[in-house]
Amino acid sequence: MKRFAILAALCLLALPAVALAGDMNLSVSPPEITIDATYDGAILHVAGEVPEGSQIVARFSGTPEKVAVKEKGKALGLLWMNMNTLHFSGVPSVFLVESSAPLEGLGGAGCDLGLTGLMRAVTVEPSTADAVAMRSELLKLKRKDKLYREHVGGVTLEPAQNGVRKFSAAIAVPSRLSAGTYTVDVFAVKDGVVAAQASRSLQAKMVGIPALMADLAFNSAVWYGVLASLIAIVAGLAIGLVFQGKGAH
């Protein structure tokens, strides 16, 4: 029995630092994101407690998926056009990071938890493609669309009491968000490793007109086309009236 206890202790010591991380108290509000006709982004409020001396990394991310894009190149060295199709695997639709300190100052864990670690895990096919360059281009595209972001300063840490610190974070979710399941992850980083972590799932769902349009698009293409045409006509008439009114003055 004694031998077994010693062996178990040695096995625990051999595990990586992240595996030894404990759980933390975590709350996320609102509990879900509703995408209606006036949706223009949302603010997620995250709060909890972490071990004293820790820094916070909070993330909002979508489920990793496969993405196919066309690689542009010069045909015969003259004309720019679409060339090969590149397939990226392990790409979340959204990846937003808020931290209480710069990630590069948090040791190995800091880099792993941010965009650097995410891009390192993304695979690119075909194998003949320049994976490093293609990942860089993908990251530029996602940043331009405001779907990928790293930001320092969105996390507030209170003074430590009884060995723990309360924290709060605000994560700005972009307006360009699809309905689906997302994850809020919070990591307490101490001495270069993850000391505690917690995750919460969060649903983003369409309501009102966006939900109606999505339902028609998938289940009734004819009515979707009719409704889309009517909306375009009404919008065109409204714009015409506005400019006509301005011209009258």
Image: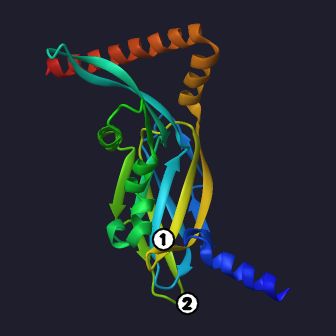
Task: State which tag comes first along the sequence, 1 or 2.
Answer: 2
Find numbered disc 1 in the image and state the secondary structure of the residue it sits on. strand
Q: Nearer the viewer, mark 1 or mark 2?
A: 2
Instruction: Name the outermost residue toward the right.
Output: 1
For the image shown, how many numbered marks are present on the structure? 2
Which residue was labeled with disc 1?
168
Place of residue 45 in the rendered image (x, y in percent of width and height, measured from the top left): 50, 62
**Can residue 23 be seen at all in this image of the molecule?**
no
Question: What's under tag 1, amino acid-wise?
Answer: Ser
Determine the residue positioned at 62% across, 58% down.
200
- Determine whether 30 is above or below 4 in the image: above
Determine the residue positioned at 56% across, 69% down.
18
Horizontally, residue 177 falls left or right of residue 162, namely left
- Determine whether 84 is above or below 30 in the image: above
Place of residue 73 in the rendered image (x, y in percent of width and height, measured from the top left): 24, 22
- Determine whether 144 is above or below 234 in the image: below
Determine the residue positioned at 15% across, 18% down.
247
Determine the residue positioned at 34% across, 14% down.
237
**Image quadrant assignment for residue 171:** bottom left
Instruction: Name the outermost residue toward the front.
Output: 3
Which residue was labeled with disc 2?
163
- Determine whether 185 is above or below 189 in the image: above
